[in-house]
Image (cartoon, rainbow, N blue to C red):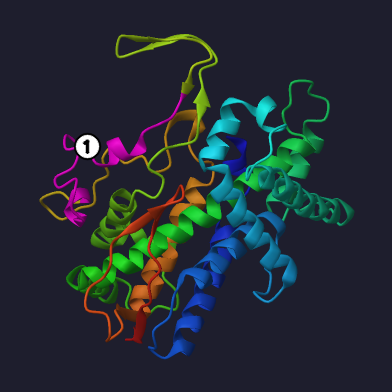
Amino acid sequence: MALRKLALGTKTQEGHVQDEACRLLRFFQKEKGNPVDPACQLANSMANVICAVAFGRRFSIEDPVFRQLITTIDVLINTRQSIWGRVYDLFPWLMHRLPGPHQRIFHDAKVLRAFILQEIRSHQKDMTNEPQDLIDYYLHQIAAMEDDPKSTYNEENLIQVVADLFMAGTEATTTTLLWALLYMVAHPHIQENVQNELDAVVGSKQLIEYEDRKRLPYTNAVIHEIQRYGNVIPVGPLRQCIQGTTLLGIPIAKGTFILPNISSVLHDPEHWKTPQQFNPDNFLNDQGQFVCSEAFLPFLAGHRVCFGEQLARMELFTFFTNLLRSFTFQLPESVKHANLGCVYRPILKPLPYEICAIPR
């Protein structure tokens, strides 16, 4: 997809990710090892990465506009993926007319749309020849394709692209990092192994960069195992066949609705050494080199793969490595064991917890 070439996963965007990582490090430093629930701060950090990528600027956590944006996205995600949202996917013409909790979707979707449209108008007013963010890149692409009748670059699609980026890029990445910290306190020996590799390979350089992952096989394996075992999105978005086809000898008619069962792939015993256990060895060969199985599909696959995949990978690596290089994460003294229970809404989230970030 052209969007990947426009703004996602570039060096400029890595700068935005590193900036938010630094702010998160300062947050934990101020806590001085006291117990803290990291969920809200992680969500703010991830949302501000998306704001920087899409709008070219970040927001203060105290900004009422930003707080409303976070609330709107949270409600949209939880309602959209509830049973009401699933029924809407099947019967949109009916659900628009029926009362129920799903009506909140339509209101909040309008709020998010208005927010994005306001940012687009601001960008159009201050357009330059050098695109600075996703909206800039997309607006330039609209202008460049203006005479192409088959072009799909238009304002409506831009609004949807930015909305999708917020919806997919905030909650899922935040939740993955919440699992990451929880798994580290549950498996302190793995946390120590990651820290030892970071100390030996990158040392005390100012910030660990995404390119460093190639020199950190164990750490890279741990991050991938967090995504596999955490299984944040066990069932992918609803899809529909646009033409008849055959899969494994089974005919699938045009118009058939399909739900990708991601969980079955991420826990398939034919592809993983210990599918039901948290084990970085699932991504390491006998020589300790990083290897990635074709069954690792947390971002789906094919033409419908998550278009923010590269940005999400960069966020996970940058935040996780810089946090573990700076702190050792522990449970509060009053908590004896990490609770690895979860709630499905519809993202698989850990139960609320507190941790202590002990400076190294």
Q: Residue visible at 42% across and 33% down?
A: 301
Image height check: is 178 above or below 159? below
Q: Is residue 279 magenta?
A: yes
Residue under the point 70% across and 61% down: 56
Report the quarter where the C terminus lies. Answer: bottom left
Q: Quadrant of residue 271?
A: top left
Name the residue at 44% across, 37% down: 236
Residue found at the far front of this picture: 99
- Give the side of residue 216 with respect to residue 108, left or right: left
Can the viewer see residue 52 in this picture?
no
What is the crowding at mark 1: few (fewer than 14 residues within 10 Å), some, or many (at least 20)? some
Q: Secondary structure at mark 1?
A: loop
Determine which residue is flagged by label 1: 268
Q: Residue furthest left?
A: 286
Residue 125 is situated, as x and y percent measured from the top left of the image, at 89, 54
Picture quarter with the N terminus: top right
In magenta, the rendered stretch is 258-283
Q: Is residue 302 above or below residue 23?
A: above
Q: What number of labels is visible?
A: 1
On the rendered structure, is 98 left or right of 219?
right
Q: Is residue 246 left or right of residue 243?
A: left
Q: Amino acid at mark 1?
A: Asp
Q: Locate residue 120, reporting x and y percent.
A: 80, 50
The answer to which quarter of the image holds residue 202 is bottom left
Asked if the stretch drawn in magenta spans residue 184, the answer is no
Visible in this render: residue 145?
yes
Q: Is the stretch drawn in magenta largely helix, strand or loop?
A: loop
Residue at the image point whose x is 45% and y is 29% from the top: 302
Counting from the top left corner in percent of width and height, residue 249 is at: 30, 9
